[in-house]
Every structure is written in C-alpha cells, then in structure tokens.
Amino acid sequence: MGVAAPNISEAISSTLAQMNTWGTAIAKLGNQEAFIAILIYILGLMAGLSVFAITKVQSLRQEEKEHYAELILSKPVSRIKWMGSYLTVVFASNALILLVLGLSSELGWSIAAGEFSHLPRVLGMSLSKIPPVWTIIGIAVLLYGWLPRMASVLNWLILGVFIFIEMLWEVGIVGWSALQWTPFAYAHYSIPIQELSIAPLIVLTVIAAALTWLGFIGFRHRSIG
C-alpha cells in the first residue's frame, strides 16, 4: 500500500470530487494521503479488523461448544480469569495489528517517495481506529456473555448494518448524522487526521470497556455449554 501511494495520479481527485463523497474526501486530503487513509480504513476497521475481532470473540463460544471451556473451568480457574485472559489477547492483538499497519504503510510510502514526513499522519490514521475496533469487540463480548446462542448471528447482523449505513453515506442517500450511529464515523477516512477529535475516541474506549464489563457479568451468571 505504502509503496503504491506515490504512483497515484494527481488528476484523479478533480474527476472523482464531482461524483460522490468518496471523491470529495480524496480531493480534500490529496490523492496519495487519501489512498492510504481509505485502505487503512477498510483494512483496519470497516472490513478488516472488525471481522477479525468478531471472529476471535466467537472463538470463546466455539471452545464452550467443544467443552474445552468446561474442562478448564473444572480446574482452579475462574470464569473471569479464563475469559479475561482470552480477551486481553484479543484487545491487544487488534491494537498491535493497527500499529504495525500504520508503521509499515508509512515506511513503504516514505521509501517510495524518498522522504519521511508522513509518519505522524499515517500512524495517527491507524491508531485512531483502535477505539472503534474495541467498541465492536465490546459489542461481541456483551452478546457472548448474555446471548451466546444468538451472538454469532447478531454480531454479523450489527456489523452488516454498520457497513450498510456506510455504503448509503458513500452514495449520498443518508447524511453524516446517520453515519454517526456507527463507530466508523469517529475515525473516518474523510476526516483529515489533524482535524480528528480525540474526545469521541475516548468515549468509544469507555463504551467498549463498559460493554466488555457487562459481557463479563452475563458470562459469570449463565450456564456453560
């Protein structure tokens, strides 16, 4: 991605800016930076790590169904400790992947362009996706804790609704206020990283923590299996 960025034609934005919101964002950010921003957004949030995060949380349910969880919990291991250790890896791995995504994209772009001034912006693009991804993890944990049998369907349905709203915004059918009902809006590619507000990202982090805590409560009081 980074190596390809300098080869993006500067003539693209003036054409696409007349077509849709995606083109307007390219015109605002500049072709090369917008190229990186959109790919990080897709891979790091909308259709990449969101899917990865949900899949990893659902692995807890799979271990339950295969009776691995019951076997572990028959030992002197609490439910909170078992689930907590698993989710620590899920939260940390997603943050680490986003860090690596930002660093590697910036490195490729800098090497190909012959100058290294992009690091703060690209790293900011990538790390700003952590709270929205964590929010999606929190939703998955909440559903696993309280509705384990329905969690898989509900998780993919909720993510599908988020992506559908994104697509409607892309073609101009719904406005920005509708997109703000999804975690995507608060680290969106169309917002220049220097204009991105930190406060909503902090709120998303708190929401993710609260949803996870509620998921722990549900798991602690329900039956296993």
Image (cartoon, rainbow, N blue to C red):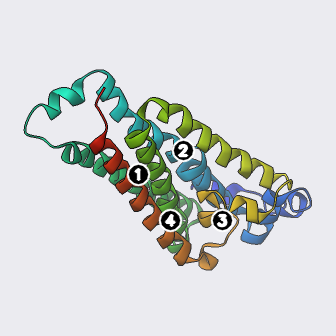
Q: Are marks 4 and 1 in contact (CB under 8 Å)?
A: no
Task: Estimate the spatial distance between the alpha carbons at disc 4 and disc 1, rounded to whole Å.
Answer: 15 Å
For disc 3, the marked residue is 33
**Left or right: 25, with 54 as reference point:** right
Helix, strand or loop at label 4? It is: helix
Q: Considering only order in the chain, which callout, 1 or 4, is on the residue closer to the N terminus?
A: 1
| Inter-mark Cα distance, 1 to 3 | 23 Å
Give the residue type at disc 1: Asn
4 vs 1, front mark: 4
Instruction: State which tag comes first along the sequence, 1 or 2.
Output: 2
Res. 1 visible in picture: no
Q: Nearer the viewer, residue 90 or 83?
A: 83
User: Around disc 2, counting alpha carbons within 10 Å, would you say few (fewer than 14), some (14 to 19), or many (20 or more)?
Assistant: some
Which amino acid type is marked by label 2? Gly
Q: Is residue 135 left or right of residue 6?
A: left
Which residue is label 4 attached to?
Answer: 204
Nearer mark to the viewer, of 2 and 3? 2
Q: Is tag 3's residue or tag 4's residue first in the polypeptide sequence?
A: 3
Tell me the residue that label 2 is attached to: 48
- Element at label 3: helix
Tag 4 or tag 2, which sits nearer the N-term? 2
- Contact flag, marks 2 and 4 (Cβ < 8 Å): no
Q: Secondary structure at mark 2?
A: loop
Tell me, for residue 94, which label it has, or none.
1
Which picture quadrant has residue 176? Answer: bottom right
- The alpha-carbon separation of the residues under discs 2 and 3 comes to 19 Å
Amino acid type, residue under disc 4 in the picture: Leu
User: Residue shown at 49%/32% (left/top)?
Assistant: 150
- Using the rendered image of the protein, determine whether residue 158 is visible from the camera's viewpoint: yes
